[in-house]
Image (tube, grey):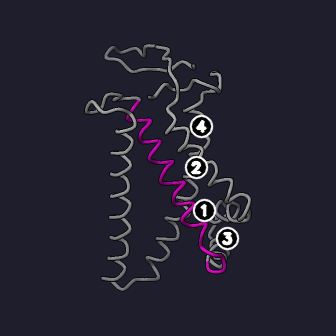
């Protein structure tokens, strides 16, 4: 198992190696995220390149919008699922690092509560965007906001994959039974 920095009350950071196995639910969730990303890479290889290009330049945003209308639309929910699970895992890792015994709950229970909270936040945010679009009759403007939100969520979800894998399985650990020891 790789070493981990654990914050303490003193001014210096204390280096404490932790031992333990990565829980099965965490490995299964990371596996799901990687499989979803692989599905997009195999069945819609042009989409990721268009996402990066449209994020960097408005010139490619129209091309991605046209492809969105022509495609089956299955890629959008897949990107959103990758972003949702990636961001909830990242928040979970931060909480576990700074407050491992949050309310006396196990890490799995903490993750479920955080995920439920993030899901409520995402649903309320989307509802508010659609409600404001309807109230102010600015459907085209809010369509652009939703499109750029999708692009940023998709890219952030993709960029979180290697970070989550490195956090879970540090390079200096054996890949079989070690990791952060978050169990």
Instruction: Give the mark nearer the N terminus: 2 vs 3.
Output: 2
The alpha-carbon separation of the residues under discs 1 and 3 comes to: 8 Å
Give SS at disc 1: helix
The alpha-carbon separation of the residues under discs 3 and 4 comes to: 30 Å
Q: Quadrant of the C terminus?
A: top left
Q: Which mark is residue 165?
A: 4
Residue 15: percent from left, percent from top: 47, 13
Q: Nearer the viewer, mark 2 or mark 3?
A: 2
Q: Give the residue pinned by disc 2.
A: 33
Residue 16: percent from left, percent from top: 46, 13
The alpha-carbon separation of the residues under discs 2 and 3 comes to: 26 Å
Q: Give the residue pinned by disc 1.
A: 55
Instruction: Give the mark nearer the N terminus: 1 vs 2.
Output: 2
Instruction: Give the mark nearer the N terminus: 3 vs 4.
Output: 3
The alpha-carbon separation of the residues under discs 1 and 2 comes to: 22 Å
Q: Give the residue pinned by disc 3.
A: 60
Instruction: Give the mark nearer the N terminus: 2 vs 4.
Output: 2
Q: Quadrant of residue 105?
A: top left
Note whether 87 is above or below 147 in the view shown. above
Q: Which mark is residue 131?
A: none
Question: Badge 1: few (under 14), some or many (20 or more) residues near its Cα, within 10 Å?
Answer: some
Residue 143: percent from left, percent from top: 48, 77
Residue 128: percent from left, percent from top: 32, 70
Q: Residue at x 47, y 54 (%)?
A: 84
Give SS at disc 3: helix
The residue stretch that appears in magenta:
69-96
Query: Mark 2 touching mark 3, by CB under 8 A?
Result: no
The alpha-carbon separation of the residues under discs 2 and 4 comes to: 10 Å
Residue nearer the viewer, 172 or 30:
30
Question: Badge 2: few (under 14), some or many (20 or more) residues near its Cα, within 10 Å?
Answer: many
Q: Residue at x 35, y 52 (%)?
A: 116
Farthest residue, direction front = 24
């Amino acid at each position: 198992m790789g070493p981990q920095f654990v914050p303490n009350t003193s001014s210096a950071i204390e280096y404490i190696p932790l031992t333990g196995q990565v829980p099965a639910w965490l490995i299964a969730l990371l596996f799901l995220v990687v499989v979803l990303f692989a599905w997009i890479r195999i069945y819609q290889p042009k989409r990721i390149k268009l996402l990066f290009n449209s994020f960097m330049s408005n010139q490619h945003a129209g091309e991605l919008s046209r492809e969105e209308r022509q495609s089956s639309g299955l890629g959008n929910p897949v990107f959103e699922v990758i972003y949702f699970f990636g961001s909830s895992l990242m928040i979970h890792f931060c909480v576990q690092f700074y407050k491992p015994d949050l309310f006396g709950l196990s890490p799995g229970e903490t993750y479920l509560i955080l995920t439920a909270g993030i899901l409520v936040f995402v649903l309320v945010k989307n509802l508010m965007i659609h409600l404001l679009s309807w109230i102010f009759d600015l459907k085209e403007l809010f369509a652009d906001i939703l499109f750029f939100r999708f692009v940023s969520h998709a890219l952030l979800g993709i960029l979180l994959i290697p970070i989550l894998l490195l956090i879970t399985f540090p390079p200096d650990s054996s890949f079989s039974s070690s990791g952060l020891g978050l169990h």
